[in-house]
Image (spheres, rainbow, N blue to C red):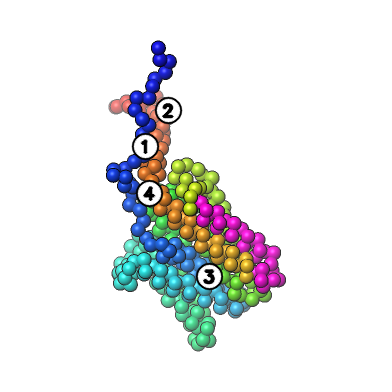
Amino acid sequence: MKTREELQVPKAEFRSYYGRPILKQPHWRVPDVPLYLFLGGLAGASASMAALADLTGRPELARVGRLAAAGGASASVVALIHDLGRPTRFLNMLRVFKPTSPLSVGSWILAPFSAAATTAAASSVTGLLPQVGRVAGIGAGVLGPALSTYTAVLLADTAVPAWHEYYPELPFVFGGSALASAAGAALVAAPPAEQAPARKMAVLGAGLELAAMSRIERRGGVVGEPYRQGRPHQLLRAGRILTGVGAGLAVLGRRSRLTSAVAGTALLAGGLCTRFGVFYAGRASAADPRYVVLPQRERLAAQAAQAGQRGTADGTTPSSTP
């Protein structure tokens, strides 16, 4: 006599028809798009740093920030156009402004920012039209925070589970990483006498980035698995180590140009690893049907449980009809 029921069918596996993913994987090119994410953040935070440095009487720090902003913006546009395939596709995105589309809003942020940052950098290098350059630099600085974080909104607005699920945290990850990267560029190129704001930015940015990434990993759940395994985990772990080391050296190496340069390099490398890690985590979650199916089932179960609680509180059952 059997004491327990035997399993009559094998346990269901999460498969899709013909082995295809449920979601279409992001077709963005590598390294174009991860570089675009990194360079845009670096440019935006550098422009804001340069504007504040200019207003507080730190001309060399302002000059470094303007050059980093212009270089990062120009390189990010090149990476974006290369991913799109034709320059006209980027121009077509500027034909219409759609407030509900993060890509449209981002394009309209990137275009004027690039023009303002390039104008400010050119004026700083040549010495021509200093007032025009200063106004352009302030304009780029105002747009900087939006440029640094809109890419996080762009990723979270997709159906990719590892990006969409963590929409509250990703802007802090990208914003903190951008601050740390901009500080890294300043620590490498600016004179030590004017690096104090950059050191504070390094600590603040590293703290925001590490805290937000820690929250993503602590939340657990099946959707967070891509962040905790494989290539994304290795990249994000390297990013945490490099960012932490860079922030620590930024504080300790106040009088050493070499230590500041090493700190800045570590911060830049950490920001690059973070952007690649987040990108690859999204790709991994789109490729595996489990990351689509299980969260849907969990949400349905939670809704059923809430309906049952409401029915119990009202003295009815969820299946009762009026």
- Residue 162 image offset from top left, x and y in percent: 43, 49
**In front: 96, or 125?**
125
Mark 2 or 1: the one toward you: 1
Q: Which residue is mark 3?
A: 46
Tell me the kind of residue under disc 2: Ala
State if disc 2 and disc 4 touch (CB < 8 Å). Answer: no
Q: Is residue 16 visible?
A: yes
| Distance between mark 2 and mark 1 Cα atoms | 37 Å
Q: Which residue is mark 4?
A: 287
Indicate the amino acid at tag 1.
Answer: Glu
Mark 2 highlights which residue?
313
**Mark drawn on residue 13:** 1
Q: Quadrant of the N terminus?
A: top left
| Residue occupying the point 63% across, 67% down | 262
Residue extending farthest right: 255
Could you say where residue 140 lies in the image, as x and y percent from the top left?
48, 73
Q: Nearer the viewer, residue 84 or 65?
A: 84
Tell which circle, 1 or 4, labels the residue nearer the N-terminal end: 1
Which of disc 3 and disc 4 is earlier in sequence?
A: 3
Residues rendered magenta in the picture = 232-260
